[in-house]
Amino acid sequence: MGMNFLNLEIYLDYIKDNGYRCTPQRSSILSYFIGQKNRFVTAKSVTDHLQNKMGNVSSDTVYRNLHLFKDIGIIDLTFQDGESLFHLKNEINTHEYKFICTECGNTTDLNLCPMEKMDTALNDYLIYDHKFEVYGVCPSCL
């Protein structure tokens, strides 16, 4: 069962619980994601936001933190048109299935797991992880 994240403090506590410090940069990155309300964003948009808010923040710092957040299960990573896109997870230790609008980046949760339909097709395989994303244009962008 996943842990439902409600606010910045819960994310920061989770980072501490995993043995990492809660730096001002990490806090600002998470605040930015919370403000994005379920959108995938680029590392560049995160970097631009931090540089506007905090001054001199390197893109290396942003990338390191984004990948740390991915490793501990706070954010998801996907790729679109050769670019990495990051999304704050609503729950940790769960799989999220998403519709992703290719115009605005907004996402919609899909309440299904395609792996349930594949269990017999993959009997002889050892599955470590899976991901399901549907890309298209949302009603607001049509």
Image (cartoon, rainbow, N blue to C red):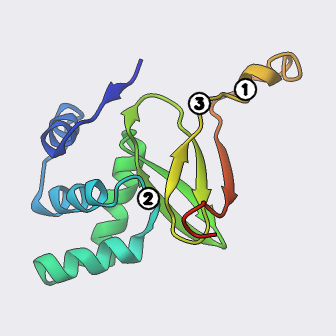
| Foreground pick, 104 / 25 | 104
Q: What residue would you read off at disc 1?
A: 115
Mark number, residue 111: 3
| Foreground pick, 37 / 11 | 37
Mark number, residue 39: 2
Q: Give residue 9's position: percent from left, percent from top.
A: 12, 41
Q: Give the structural element (helix, strand or loop) at label 3.
A: loop
Residue 5, by quadrant, is: top left
Tally of marks: 3
Residue 46, by quadrant, is: bottom left
Check the image and report above or below for 80 versus 125. Answer: below
Q: Give residue 127's position: percent from left, percent from top.
A: 70, 27
- Crowding at dot 2, Cα within 10 Å, few <14 / some 14-19 / many 20+, comes out as some
On screen, residue 131 versus residue 68, left or right, reads right
Q: Give the structural element (helix, strand or loop) at label 2.
A: loop
Marks 3 and 1 sit apart, C-alpha to C-alpha, by 12 Å
